[in-house]
Amino acid sequence: MSSKLLYILPLLSLALNGCDSASRPIVITEKRELSEKERQLALDATSKERFSMVRQMMGMPGEEDHSGHNHAEGEHNHDRAESAPLAYQLPDGWKKEATTQFRSLNFSFGKESEGQCYVSRVGGGLVANLNRWRGQMGLKPISAEEIEKLPKRLLFGMESTYVELDGSFKGMGSPEAKPDYRMVGLVLSMPDVSFFVKMTGPKALLIEHEKNFAQFCESLKLVKGGSNE
Amino acid sequence: MSKKPVTPWTRLLKFTSSFGLACVVLFLFFILTLLGTLEQVEHGLYETQKRYFDSLFVWYEVAGMDLPLIPGVRLLMWVLFFNILSAAILKMRKGWKGAGLLIAHGGILLLLVGGAIGLQFKHYGAMMIWEGDKASEFESYTEWQLDIMPVDEEGKVSEALVIPAKQIDRIASGQTRVFTAEELPFDFVVHGREVNSMPIPAGAPMAASAAGKEIDGYKLMSMKPAKQAEQNLPGMYVSFPESGKDAGEVEAILWGGDVAPYTLKRDGKRWAVKLVKEKWKVPFEIKLRDFHFEYFPGTQRARVYRSDVTKLENGTERDVRISMNQPLRHKGYTFFQSSFGPAGSDDKGDQRMYTVFAVMQNPADHWPLASLIVSGVGLLIHFLIQLGTYLKRQRKTQAKQRS
């Protein structure tokens, strides 16, 4: 075999690999036959109907399903009412607690489980919720303009408002406020609902778990459907 | 006596077939494996594999420019292939005494070629089947294709024109691509593709930061690619201008998570357009007769799970059990028991279940084994030849000493 061929072949391969037809229209040549299941399509759906999963994932008020698509048995196997499936990585030292009416995910940490972190969906806007939290910490409410200036971080890949509040914490149903507490929260605000991750506990303990909170929020994902992997 | 002139080709051949080059390539394999292992912690396995192992070069941003600073594993595999091939042709001992080493090297070349074939032609995905149903295709975990389906007069669809995943993958964010087909009275224009995205109601606060146009009350928001690439839901803005005309304004948002296609009307005819996971047909059918699983007592961890299936092919049926360590292998396809659902089911066996198989199709599936055998045989032959030569030399020496 000519030794020169040893060099022409890889150069040809590189050239072909690098070829890009970005500027020219690409002709579609591939066709396929649809399976029986794929032929059951809901035609003429509106954007609201087509993107209904966004609303389900966010726990937003749903709509009557006119799609004719059988959601009960098919690829969308998650509970549409309350518990949009969430995937996450449990940080070291955090213990999973039972979910409640308002807490989709619920965790505790610390020697006496005095630190708490939970994920929740509530109605009401960003301003109302953040000022409610400030009230819980014995702090005065702030304006929408001041809330707008708060730092931003990502939750579910979307820009969310981050708060860090120090004060005396009086939770719902608590008889008295607990001094020297910290509250950290990340709020994703949608038109009809807010999605948030909230952490409360003694200030020193929360400083220790600051990194865990950031890692937990980063790992939190909304997942389509539900299966046992 | 005049010396043979050293041409540039000769110098290049000497370099290509050198042992030093092989050492450098192997060292670079080690470096890339190390870098890839560290990077996948942050960016996930799929993206790291694409960046370091499936590429010709690994690109890094330096002073605002993307530069190919290190060769990728794909390029190194080519270099190693030609290194071994040229060394075998030029440097290997000719004659029967070099046969063993030649065969052993042939085994290594077989491994590299098998790797290249796998890279080019391998398909890996999932097949989900409910009890009582059958399936004959599986879909990719991570790659997406675009289906454009003509709707007939009865409002039914039966086939699709496909823009394959390879072409979708090449469209970067903000890049426009035009697709045409004889069957289409319009061009299909993609105005940028987002690897991971979500359509946001235009009234949401974060919609203000989404760069795209509002369509039908929604804007497409770009999201950070998930570490697990299977969770990415791609999105794109598209338009359908008259064939050969300008790309025009965007008309629709396509999203991987939508539950229904976008329906386009043109000249009294309808077309349904949808992003779907890349699909491959299997040349036979699998029917799930029964799925069985058990939890470890007192836990929600599956202790055992298995699928009793029937393979249907050319009018014949064969019952097979697929379980955690017992895949089904047939015609180059391997079906592994991967997972099941619905989530939260109990193990009493009174609900309708579905099974999920991880399906692998690799024409070079057994080439690593063949390569191992060939290399092993080559080394054995070489050892026997060396042993024979040594024994012969020993006998000669002893005979000399006696005489």
Image (tube, coloured by chain):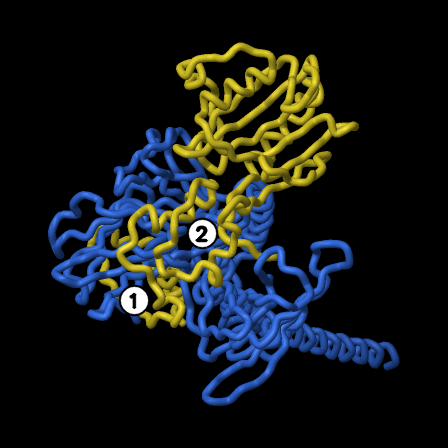
Q: Which mark is residue B55?
A: 2
Q: CA distance from mark 2 to mark 1?
A: 31 Å
Q: Quadrant of residue B208?
A: top left
Which of the chains is blue?
Answer: B
Name the subunit of mark 1: B
Please tell me how many numbered marks the rendered image carries: 2
Chain drawn in yellow: A
Q: Residue at x 45, y 45 (%)?
A: A56
Q: Estimate how packed mark 1 is, as few (under 14), some (14 to 19) or many (20 or more) residues with alpha carbons within 10 Å.
A: many
Q: Is residue A77 above or below residue A92?
A: below
Query: What amino acid is at disc 1?
Result: Ala
Can you see residue B52?
no
Tell me the amino acid under the disc marked 2: Ser
Nearer-the-camera pick, B247 or B157: B157
Asked whether residue B37 is in view, the answer is yes
Q: Position of residue B16 (x, y in %)?
A: 48, 57
Vertical position of residue B87 compared to residue A121: above or below: below
Which image quarter is the N terminus of chain B in? Answer: bottom left
Residue drawn 18% across and 67% down?
B183
Disc ID at residue B160: 1
Residue A213 horizontal/vertical position (percent): 61, 30
What chain is tagged by disc 2? B
Residue at the extreme top of the image, as rendered: A140
Q: Looking at the figure, which quarter contains the C terminus of chain B?
A: bottom right
| A182 relative to A227, above or below | above
